[in-house]
Image: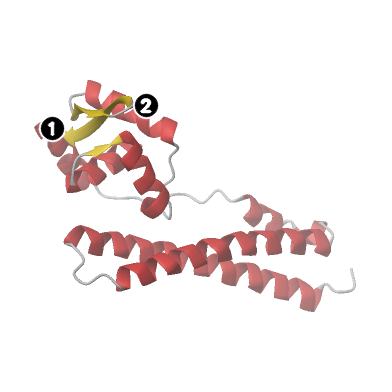
Amino acid sequence: MALAHTILTVLCEQPRSGYAISKLFEETIACYWKASQQQIYRELAAMEAKGWLNHELVPQAGKPDKKVYALTTTGREELDRWNREPTHPTPIREDLGVRVLGGANMPPAVLIGELERRRRIHQQNLENYLQRQQEFQRMAAPSLHDQFRFLTLRRGIRYEQEWVAWCEEVRDYINEHLQDR
């Protein structure tokens, strides 16, 4: 998936500034797609050059004018073309998986330390996503866009749950079978 198509999807809901798009990435999209503010601004310029977006300058008091981006007909056509393409699973490239693969060749304490560190990271992500889930569940009448955003959040929750469970499974195996090493 290209960053451009993620931005096109975000802009289908409503026009947004680059800053607003960046915040949306941080707050809701990060569970399945990460992009820095610099990457987003660079991509917005490229998309505008392709004719997929246009922008309106909105004056701001005491600040430079804000660019608010909106989809063009060409941008909607590109998103429609992309939406019709089949998706493919993303190959896994995970350093921790390689470390576990070589776990028989390293001190168990070293591997357990890294498993615990990663478990804490995934647990923190999970707690953040669960908090967002509660916020969504308190919404009186979520829009269709919000409901689909919630479904992607659920995918992020499951992803983090699986990571936490796997780190615990490997840690428990090492503690049970390799205590004497």
Up/down of 120 relative to 79, above or below? below
The residue positioned farthest toward the left in the image shown: 73
- Asked whether the beta carbons under mark 2 and mark 1 sit within 8 Å of each other, the answer is no
Residue at 80 percent across and 58 percent down: it is 110
What residue is shown with label 1?
Answer: 72
Q: CA distance from mark 2 to mark 1?
A: 18 Å
Up/down of 73 relative to 156, above or below? above
Which residue is nearer to you in this view: 62 or 114? Answer: 62
Q: Between disc 2 and disc 1, whose residue precedes?
A: 2
Residue at 37 percent across and 26 percent down: it is 42
Q: What mark, if any, has residue 157 been given in the picture?
A: none
The secondary element bearing badge 2 is classed as helix
The residue positioned farthest toward the front in the image shown: 62
Estimate the x, y position of residue 57 in percent, counting from the top left. Answer: 21, 26
Which residue is nearer to you in this view: 172 or 73? Answer: 73
The residue positioned farthest toward the top in the image shown: 49
What residue is shown with label 2?
Answer: 42
Asked if residue 89 can be seen in this view, the reply is no
The residue positioned farthest toward the bottom in the image shown: 176
Estimate the x, y position of residue 108 in percent, counting from the top left. Answer: 81, 64
Quarter-of-image position of residue 10: top left
Residue at 37 percent across and 62 percent down: it is 153
Quarter-of-image position of residue 59: top left
Q: Amino acid at mark 2?
A: Arg
**What crowding class fits label 2: few (fewer than 14 Cα within 10 Å), some (14-19), or many (20 or more)?**
few
Q: Which quadrant is the N terminus positioned in? A: top left
Up/down of 80 relative to 75, above or below? below
Q: Which quadrant is the C terminus positioned in? A: bottom right
Asked if residue 147 can be seen in this view, the reply is yes
